[in-house]
């Protein structure tokens, strides 16, 4: 696997750990051996990316969020 694929997998796992397992960002940071600030950056970026591609209820892109 390439570094890009591994990072995408890690980023998805960070979001899953926080959203589904309700882990703190500090706990996630310790798990991946990265800083809490880096976890926050990754989490915010990944959540924004998901919101950008999610369609609004009328089937059109929602540019207001």
Image: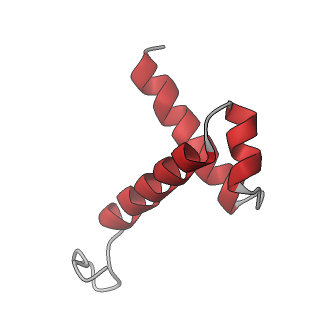
* Picture quarter with the C terminus: bottom left
Q: Residue lying farthest top?
A: 1
Write down the quadrant of residue 45 in the picture: bottom left
The picture places residue 63, in percent across and down from the top left corner, at 21, 78
Identify the image's colour scheme: rainbow, by chain, secondary structure or one colour: secondary structure
Tell me the residue at 53%/41% (across/down).
11
- Residue 41 is left or right of residue 36, and the answer is left
- Image side of residue 58 versus residue 13, left or right: left
- Asked where in the image residue 4 lies, by quadrant, the reply is top left
Rendered position, 65 above or below 12:
below
Question: Which residue appears at 54% of the width and 54% of the height?
Answer: 40
- Name the residue rendered at 65%, 52% in the picture: 16
Report x, y in % for residue 55: 32, 72
In this view, the residue in front, 34 or 57, is 34
Residue nearer the viewer, 52 or 34: 34
Total number of numbered labels? 0
The residue sitting at 23% across, 74% down in the picture is 61
Work out whether 13 lies above or below 16. above
1 relative to 13, above or below: above
Q: Position of residue 35 (x, y in %)?
A: 61, 40
Q: From the viewer's side, name the closer residue of 30 and 6.
A: 30
In x, y percent, where is residue 49?
36, 57
């Amino acid at each position: 696997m390439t570094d890009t694929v591994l990072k995408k997998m890690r980023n998805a796992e960070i979001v899953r750990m926080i959203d589904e397992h309700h882990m703190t960002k500090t706990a996630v940071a310790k798990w991946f051996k990265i800083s809490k600030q880096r976890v926050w950056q990754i989490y915010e970026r990944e959540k924004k990316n998901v919101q950008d591609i999610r369609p609004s209820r009328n089937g059109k892109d929602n540019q207001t969020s």
